[in-house]
Image (tube, rainbow, N blue to C red):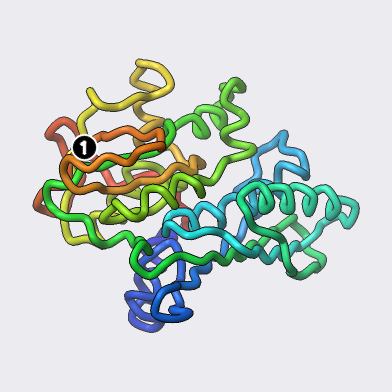
Amino acid sequence: MNDRDLLETIRPLIGYDETGDDCAAFPLNKNSILVSSVDMLHESTDFPLGMTDYEIGWMSVAVSLSDVASCGAQPKQVLVAVGLDDPKRLYNIMRGSQDCAKAFGAMVSGGDIDSHSELTVVTTAFGIVSSDTYKRRSGASVGDQICVTGVPGRAQAALDGHVEFQKYLFMPVPQVHEGIRIAPLASAMMDVSDGLVLSLYDLVTASGVGASLYSSLFHPFDSSSYAQSCYLYGGGDFGLLFTLPPNVVVDGVDYTVIGTIVEGSSVSLDGKIVPRKGYAHSWE
């Protein structure tokens, strides 16, 4: 069982709308929505060997800011709870956390400190978005363009030992500014932290459609089959996956059109259905 399977067991309890997106949403007034997202990271499963405590703090905040960005929201505040195996690590973890928050217009405004046998960091990010530009995973329609920011797969390549891509793994850059520009024009949006294909399956399932990808449109970090595999299935990237109506272009954002929304419920690559796989927490 993986985390998506486990989520399905509680969706009837919590609610389908409440468990269907990267962020929770709360209307502040008729014009604005408060969005929030929480993430829990553990040293053994989420922080690769070689990361500094500063980078751990940066990454921990970046993953939650990425969720906020996927809604088209501007991050405002971040709460950071740290379960410490060694109290001497706290200062640099918080220095990285605060620097990441500030870089994207937010601030660390509270949290919690506790002792733990394994370093564990829990971050909760809050952002504000206007009601008419707030984006969800649902909303994609047949004929829409499928788009992605950045180059998926570089974080996975770094995890596999390609040190030239290490910065993409250790200090991911949440696409906050890009999300704000994309949201007014997009029909659906989410981030790709769990891998492009797995994220696309999440998006098309929420939208009740299918997707066709075309490898000729990809821009992987090199032309090898390994790079394409990382591009499709590698986790740890924090680009945005979004759909645009036909012929709509987002100015001022570096993105790639990689396919088309179609009827159905599957994701295909060059006409062949691809498996629903990517990065997922699992329980044997």
Q: Residue type at mark 1? A: Gly
Q: Residue furthest top?
A: 223
48 vs 33, left or right, is right
Could you tell me which residue is drawn at 70 percent across and 46 percent down? Answer: 56
Q: Viewer-proximal residue, 104 or 20?
A: 104
Q: Viewer-proximal residue, 260 or 198?
A: 260
Please, what secondary structure does the residue beneath circle 1 have?
strand
114 vs 206, left or right, is right
Residue 251 image position (x, y, % from top left):
35, 38
Q: Residue furthest left?
A: 263
Could you tell me which residue is drawn at 42 percent across and 59 percent down? Answer: 71
Residue 173 image position (x, y, % from top left):
56, 41
Among the 4 quarters of the image, the one containing residue 178 = top left
Residue 34 in the image: above or below residue 64: below
Task: Report the residue marked by disc 1.
Answer: 259
Q: Residue furthest bottom?
A: 13
Could you tell me which residue is drawn at 74 percent across and 47 percent down? Answer: 96
Residue 61 image position (x, y, % from top left):
64, 54
Could you tell me which residue is drawn at 20 percent across and 34 percent down? Answer: 269
Residue 147 image position (x, y, % from top left):
30, 40
Q: Viewer-proximal residue, 168 or 65?
A: 65
Classify mark 1: residues with Cα within 10 Å, few (<14), some (14-19) or many (20+).
many
Quadrant that contains the N terminus: bottom left
Figure label count:
1
214 vs 12, left or right, is left
Among the 4 quarters of the image, the one containing residue 246 = top left
